């Protein structure tokens, strides 16, 4: 496929992954159109770059010379998709289009895993940029240093996160693969942990078959199981607790972030000062350092890169501070992510935490109901609002209040407030000076932050 001689239409262009691909195609000089169901900052941004965006999804949006790119959230009865198939147009899933873009580059780096993909991808891009390599990158959230989730660089390096939620990461053909960790997630698709592991093994094996290498977390039980089957010259490991190629010791958490002593192949390389919080971000950093080390970037450039990294949007991002009350926003929506974020917040800030959580998807809430009730141990007050459905329909078998009931059974100070817009008024009566408020979830919970700020003022 000659990417530069085609026009593209994105069905469901507003998603971060879809919008990032659209931006890269626009930077390549391609003609891009797309559709979504509502206006957003992302859609306005793409429009300003030259894309034609329809705020509806109708058959008339499909032109007879377009290649169609389809979001995984789009169902088979979508009128645009039906029309595209009727016209016999080429239809590509998001991952297939992403792979076409990756194949324009020499070194194709893909980050997979249950947690930490966005941050790890952004750290790798930051180090490569510090080394003057001008990578093309695509992340799941805009980087704070650039304000963008995608940018077209030179043709040497492409770094992206992959999407394992529907198995589509197997559509990619990287020659460098990172697996941050593996947990039973998206089991509505995988059905069993054996099938989940089989997909991750295939993802890594494809890379090895292309004479590439795999970066693996040596502290994660699932990835440890996989790495035993990989030849030594095809893998590089990172860890905090086990002896590995890349390792962190002497970890300290502070208000500003965290620090650790870096070891590369048993050599002490000095202390790293991170601007992001928590052990989970140390793991993400080590994964990025592993890639850079394997790419023969010198140690001082690697250290400079990770110390310049400021994080990505909605990853424990500080929103504001009002009269000593700090407001943060975080994307965590899986029980492990919630637990790790709250642990790092308590360890770093050492203040009383009010967590406002919006569950994401009915299926996830139902699958992890018991795990959610164990995830908020480091929150002093928990407010749960209604479930953000994403593209799921409600079968009324689960409610956000089910989480609250279990939290109360465990003695937690928990409240169910169905309407998220009622939360700012409630919080105003709960906070005292030096409290930390964290909005959390993968839906639209961050939209209440301006209202909380206004109430606090």
Image (tube, grey):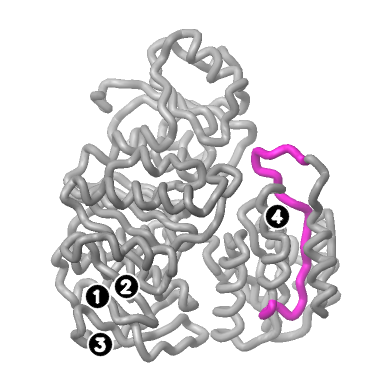
Q: Are marks 1 and 3 in contact (CB under 8 Å)?
A: no
CA–CA distance in space, label 1 to label 4: 37 Å
Among numbered discs 3 and 2, the one appearing first in the sequence? 2
CA–CA distance in space, label 4 to label 2: 31 Å
Among numbered discs 1 and 3, the one appearing first in the sequence? 1
Q: Which residue is mark 4?
A: 365
Is 426 drawn above or below residue 212 in the view shown? below
Q: Position of residue 349 (x, y in %)?
A: 58, 85
Left or right of residue 344: residue 210: left
Name the quadrant of the C terminus: bottom right
Among numbered discs 1 and 4, the one appearing first in the sequence? 1
Q: Which residue is mark 3?
A: 270
Task: Look at the image and give the residue range highlighted in magenta.
Answer: 377-394
CA–CA distance in space, label 4 to label 3: 43 Å
Magenta stretch holds residue 379: yes
Q: Which residue is mark 1?
A: 245
Residue mark closest to the camera, 3 vs 2: 2
The answer, for residue 351, to whether it is visible in the render is yes
Q: Are marks 4 and 2 in contact (CB under 8 Å)?
A: no
Among numbered discs 4 and 2, the one appearing first in the sequence? 2
Q: Secondary structure at mark 1?
A: loop
């Amino acid at each position: 496929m000659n990417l530069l001689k085609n026009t593209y239409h994105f069905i469901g262009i507003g998603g971060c992954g879809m919008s990032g691909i659209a931006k890269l195609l626009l930077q390549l000089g391609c003609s891009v159109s797309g559709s979504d169901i509502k206006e957003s900052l992302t859609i306005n941004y793409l429009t300003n770059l030259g894309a034609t965006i329809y705020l509806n999804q109708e058959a008339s949006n499909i032109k007879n010379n377009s290649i169609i790119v389809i979001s995984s959230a789009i169902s088979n009865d979508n009128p645009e998709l039906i029309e595209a198939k009727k016209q016999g147009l080429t239809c590509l899933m998001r991952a297939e289009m992403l792979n076409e873009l990756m194949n324009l580059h020499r070194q194709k780096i893909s980050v997979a895993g249950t947690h930490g993909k966005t941050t790890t991808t952004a750290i790798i891009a930051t180090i490569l940029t510090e080394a003057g390599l001008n990578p093309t990158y695509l992340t799941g959230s805009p980087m704070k240093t650039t304000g963008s989730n995608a940018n077209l660089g030179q043709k040497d390096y492409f770094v992206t996160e992959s999407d394992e939620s529907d198995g589509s990461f197997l559509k990619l053909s990287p020659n460098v693969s990172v697996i941050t960790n593996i947990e039973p997630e998206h089991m509505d698709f995988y059905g069993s942990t054996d099938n989940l592991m089989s997909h991750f093994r295939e993802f890594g094996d494809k890379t090895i078959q292309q004479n590439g290498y795999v970066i693996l977390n040596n502290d994660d039980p699932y990835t440890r199981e996989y790495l035993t089957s990989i030849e030594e010259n095809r893998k590089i490991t990172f860890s905090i607790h086990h002896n590995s190629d890349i390792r962190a010791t002497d970890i300290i958490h502070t208000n500003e972030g965290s620090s650790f002593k870096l070891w590369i192949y048993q050599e002490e390389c000095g202390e790293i000062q991170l601007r992001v919080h928590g052990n989970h971000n140390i793991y993400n950093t080590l994964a990025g350092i592993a890639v850079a080390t394997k790419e023969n970037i010198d140690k001082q450039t690697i250290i400079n890169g990770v110390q310049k990294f400021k994080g990505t949007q909605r990853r424990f991002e500080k929103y504001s501070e009002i009269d000593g009350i700090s407001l943060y926003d975080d994307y965590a929506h899986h029980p492990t992510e919630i637990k790790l974020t709250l642990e790092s917040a308590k360890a770093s800030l050492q203040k009383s935490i009010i967590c406002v959580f919006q569950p994401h998807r009915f299926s996830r809430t139902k699958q992890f109901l018991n795990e959610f009730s164990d995830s908020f141990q480091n929150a002093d007050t928990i407010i749960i609002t209604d479930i953000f459905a994403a593209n799921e329909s409600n079968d009324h078998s689960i409610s956000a209040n089910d989480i609250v009931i279990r939290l109360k059974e465990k003695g937690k100070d928990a409240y169910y407030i169905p309407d998220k817009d009622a939360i700012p008024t409630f919080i105003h009566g709960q906070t005292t000076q030096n409290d930390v408020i964290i909005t959390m979830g993968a839906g639209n919970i961050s939209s209440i932050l301006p209202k909380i700020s206004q109430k606090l003022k």
